Structures are given as structure tokens and as C-alpha cells.
Amino acid sequence: MLKDFIIQNWSNMLVLLAFAILLRTTVYLDKKTKRRMYVLIVGLLVLSVTVFIEFSLAEMGEGRDTRLFLMGVRYSATPLIIALIIYTLAKNVRWILFIPALVLTVLDMVSVHTGIVFYLDSEGTLRRGPLGYLPYIMVGVYAALLVIILVKRSNKRPTEIIPIGFLCLAFLSGLVLPFLMGKDYSRIFCVTVTIALFVYHVFTILQLTEKDALTGLLNRQSFYSAVSNDSKDIRALVTIDMNGLKEINDREGHAAGDTALETLASCFMKAATMRDSVYRLGGDEFMIVCRNSSEEEVRQLIDRIRALVSETKYSCAIGYSFSQEEHQDIDEMMKESDEMMYKDKVEYYAMPGHKRYRG
């Protein structure tokens, strides 16, 4: 049986091993994220063992009760795995994310005796119960949530959207292929998810030279590359500077300052559209490049930023410059945007009772 398992799951085991080695040698991930990644690897390996045992028992026509239990595990595993992927890849996601998947797990375990989700007929064939489509619905919801969260926290460039789409495709296959391939899809599900995660992780590593390690925004090098190589469709620059970062660092330490910068970066990414690129130039300085946008759209972007930042305990000064010219002077635009931003900062600190950082 061990030999059969290795033969059927060798590719999955090999990719999981490569994934674990890559995690071990990746220095940019924090320990918490790495631990969650390792849990994912172990979970996928355990699921592959579960599927192998279940199918082996089915082929031998034995262990009806054991098969039902393993089916419950298999039906429950997919939503739990996707929830764990969201919990691992997306920041600031709370544990309540797992509640729907855990409810499904309870229903699956109850179904072992009641057949409410699945059951085996007199010939040992798997049948769906009244809630038989619930696991597929749950997978679809979690997959959609994963894509929405990853797109929102991305810089919305093709180099980031394509890997997200690849990851989405892997999970959406779990909604379509089971109806085309039947139960045989379960044999390839684990390696499908493993390859998708591995490829996404590799793409993430390749993007490191363009990204700021703390916030996930594009870095200064990417900004100067973008404005020097492809500036003809740039219509606006938005300059942003955080208020009170030094005060936070002095009072609470640099870890609190890092949290503040991450929070603001998240606000900027949520406010940006697909045509906007968000950069951290260094320290508490940020820049948004707006392509093919009208001045009204730029103002709406700034309004969205102010609204999102107002929901936090932080604040920032914002300025912008706009030009309709196809070959505009980027340096002049930056100067104009900076001047407006500094004016905003001066007015902020000069205003009586202004909103300082709320620790």
C-alpha cells in the first residue's frame, strides 16, 4: 500500500518538499507566516493520505464506516485549506474567517450518520444528500473572497494579477472538474493546490526587487523606472506624507511606527484603482502615479484616501499635480505635488485642536 501511495502521490510530495525548502531559504517572510505555510504543507500531505486510503477502501469494497468518515474529512478539508490560505497570505484577517468552514465540518461529520451532505447507497456508491452542494458553494465563496482580498492588497499590476488569477483557477477547478471527472478529481486536487501555491510563492519572490518589504507597495526603484520608461500616459502624481510618525516612534517604538505605515499603505491600496500605482519612496513618503485619469478622478481618489485614513488613528498630508500633456515634465509635477502636500501639512499642524495621533 505504501508503494502505491508513493507512486500515485510522488509529484505532489516532490512539490511539497520543494515548497518547504523554498520557505526555509526565504528570508523575507516572518515566522508567523512561515508557520502557517508549513501547516498548509502538512495539511495537504495529510489530505492526500486521506484520499488515498478512502479510494483504496472503495476499490476493495471494505470499511464502509471508515470510508464515510474519510469522506467527511475530504469534504471538510477544501474550505478549511482555502480559509487557511487566506489567513496566511492576507494580513489583518481574523480567526472568524474559519467559522463557516468549521460549521461545514460539523455538518460533514453529522452526515456520516445522517446522510445530510453525502452518503453511500447499498452498492457503496457516493450520493449527495439534501445539502450535497454546500461544500461546493463554500469553496466558491472562499475562492472569491481569496481573490478579492489578494487583489485589494496588490498593486493591481499584471505581474501581481496573473499569479492571483492562476491561484483562483486552481480553486475554481474544484467547482467544475468534480462534475466532469467525478470522484477521480479528488486524486489530483492536492497536487493542483500545491502547484498553485508554489507558483504563487515563486511569483511573489520574483516581485521582491520591485516591492517595499514592509508595506508591500512598489518601492522607490520601481517608481523611477516607471516614470522614466513609460510616462506618456501619466496624468497625475499624488504625494502623501504621514503626519506624526516621529512622535509614534519616540513614544511607542519603531514597531508601532511600522504598524502605522502598514495601516496607511493598506488604505492607499484600497483607494487605488487599476490605473493607479502606489509607491513607498522611503520613510513616511508615498507616491501614487495615476495613468489616463481625469482630474476629477484624481480628486475622487484623494477623497477615498482621506475617508479610509479617517477610520484609523493616523493622519497624512496629501498633494497632487495634474497634466493633460502627453510628454510632461515629471520633475515639475513632483515639485508641484510636493508643494501642495507641504502646504496641507502646515495647515494641519497650524489648525487649533488638530487631530493628532491617538495612541
Image: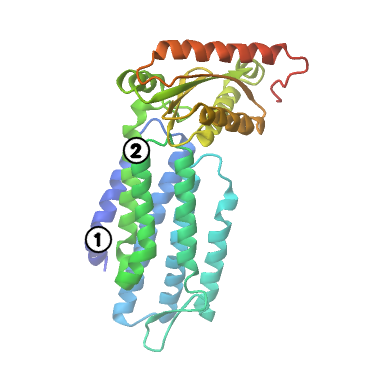
Name the residue: 32% across, 23% down.
Answer: 230
Q: Please state the horizontal and vertical placement of residue 270, each as a whole percent of the image.
A: 53, 36
Name the residue: 48% across, 55% down.
Answer: 142
Front position among marks 1 and 2: 2
Specify the label residue 158 is tagged with.
2
Q: In which quarter of the view is residue 57 placed?
A: bottom left
Mark 2 lies on a secondary structure that is helix
Specify the label residue 6 is tagged with.
1
**In which quadrant will I find the C terminus?**
top right
Q: Please state the horizontal and vertical placement of residue 58, each as a whole percent of the image.
A: 33, 78
Q: Is residue 268 left or right of residue 19?
A: right
For mark 1, does the 10 Å Cα neighbourhood hold few (<14), some (14 to 19), or many (20 or more) residues?
Answer: few
- Residue type at mark 1 is Ile
- Image height check: is 18 above or below 188? above
Q: Please state the horizontal and vertical placement of residue 338, each as a whole percent of the image.
A: 52, 13
- Whichever of callouts 1 and 2 sits on the residue coming sooner in the sequence is 1
Name the residue: 57% across, 64% down.
Answer: 103
| Residue extending farthest front | 324
Q: Can residue 24 be seen at all in this image of the molecule?
A: no
- Image height check: is 4 above or below 327? below
Q: In which quarter of the view is residue 328 placed?
A: top left
Q: Is residue 146 left or right of residue 245?
A: left
The reply to whether callout 1 and callout 2 are in contact (CB within 8 Å) is no
**In which quadrant will I find the N terminus?**
bottom left
Specify the label residue 108 is tagged with.
none
Mark 1 lies on a secondary structure that is helix
Name the residue: 35% across, 63% down.
Answer: 49
Count of marks, rendered view: 2
Q: Nearer the viewer, residue 55 or 192?
A: 192
- Image height check: is 340 above or below 16? above
- Residue type at mark 2 is Pro
